[in-house]
């Protein structure tokens, strides 16, 4: 799979070329005209969504349903390549509708690009980001590698892995911005991990650049005078094995 380098031009300045994207939401195959600023010459793409259970309910229709929270589908992504081999794999598809949510999703896409070096290590790999206007409805989707493994059963291991990755993120000069509580829903597990720490952080909608000095997950933490609430919190949770 080709993973684009960081900081592509913003959506409105990208002049992307529309391409053909076949999407199967489980109730039938539709071909949509979409655009991608990561792949301006959008090759033929197919996206088979395998986790739509409620599509028959009008409120939950992926395009015409309620403008509720973003939905994350599980799917299979296929894209043609010039050599005819194709690129494919299991993906998570974060799907939104409406311009307000699209702006937020685009911000998340930009953060994925800015954190390109941490893709596949701290955050999932970004496969693509596509937008479309379908039957008058603006939609967008963020396609990332599927990380659907189970959290570690050992709470000590789990909290240690979380702190380790948070420290890597902070050393890179970023914070996640939504790790304050003990909830673990922003932590997912890459089943084919080769880094030794299979956790990945998702939902970068509140991530931002952050100046932080850390020596390591185990020892003293030297910070700027403003402190680092996120790492302090992670360290405290680790003491409680949460
Ligand atoms: Zn920090």
Image: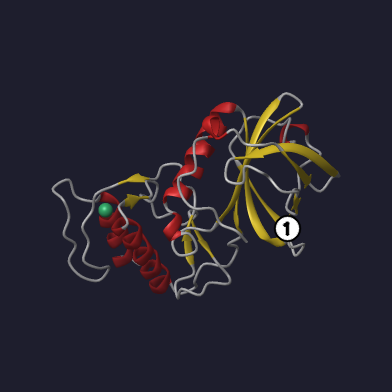
Residue depicted at x 52% and y 58%: 124
The spot of residue 210 in percent (x, y) is 28, 47
The answer to whether 65 appears left or right of 148 in the picture is right
The residue closer to the viewer here, 54 or 215, is 215
Residue 192 spot, x, y in % from top left: 58, 72
Query: Which residue is more in the foreground, 94 or 35?
Result: 35
Look at the picture and state if 147 lies above or below 194: above
Q: Nearer the viewer, residue 125 or 219?
A: 125
Q: For residue 38, which quarter of the picture?
A: top right
Q: Is residue 95 left or right of 196 when viewed as pictured?
A: right
Q: Quadrant of residue 237?
A: bottom left
Q: Is 35 in front, or is 196?
A: 35
Structural crowding at the residue carrying mark 1, measured as other residues with C-alpha within 10 Å and reported as few (<14), some (14–19) or many (≥20): few
Q: Secondary structure at mark 1?
A: loop
The yes-or-no answer for disc 1 within 8 Å of ligand 1 is no
Question: In the rendered view, does 173 fall on the left or right side of 66?
Answer: left
Residue located beneath label 1 in the image: 82
- Farthest residue, direction front: 82
Q: Where's the N terminus, which quadrant?
A: bottom right
Image colouring:
secondary structure
């Amino acid at each position: 799979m080709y993973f684009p380098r960081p900081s592509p031009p913003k959506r409105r300045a990208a002049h992307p070329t529309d391409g053909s994207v076949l999407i199967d939401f489980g109730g039938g195959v539709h071909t949509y005209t979409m655009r991608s600023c990561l792949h301006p010459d959008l090759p033929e793409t197919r996206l088979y969504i395998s986790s739509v259970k409620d599509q028959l309910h009008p409120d939950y229709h992926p395009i015409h349903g309620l403008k509720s929270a973003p939905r994350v589908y599980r799917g299979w992504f296929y894209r043609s390549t010039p050599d005819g081999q194709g690129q494919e794999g299991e993906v998570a598809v974060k799907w939104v509708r409406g311009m307000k949510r699209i702006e937020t999703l685009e911000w998340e896409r930009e953060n994925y690009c800015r954190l390109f070096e941490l893709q596949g290590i701290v955050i999932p790999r970004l496969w693509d980001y596509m937008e479309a206007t379908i039957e008058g409805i603006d939609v967008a989707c963020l396609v990332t590698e599927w990380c659907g493994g189970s959290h570690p059963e050992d709470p000590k291991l789990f909290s240690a892995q979380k702190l380790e990755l948070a420290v890597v993120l902070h050393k890179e000069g970023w914070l996640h911005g939504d790790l304050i509580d003990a909830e673990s829903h922003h932590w997912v597990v890459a089943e084919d991990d080769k880094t030794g720490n299979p956790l990945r952080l998702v939902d970068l909608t509140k991530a931002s650049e952050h100046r932080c000095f850390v020596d390591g997950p185990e020892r003293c933490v030297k910070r700027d005078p403003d402190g680092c609430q996120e790492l302090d919190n992670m360290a405290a949770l680790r003491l409680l094995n949460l």
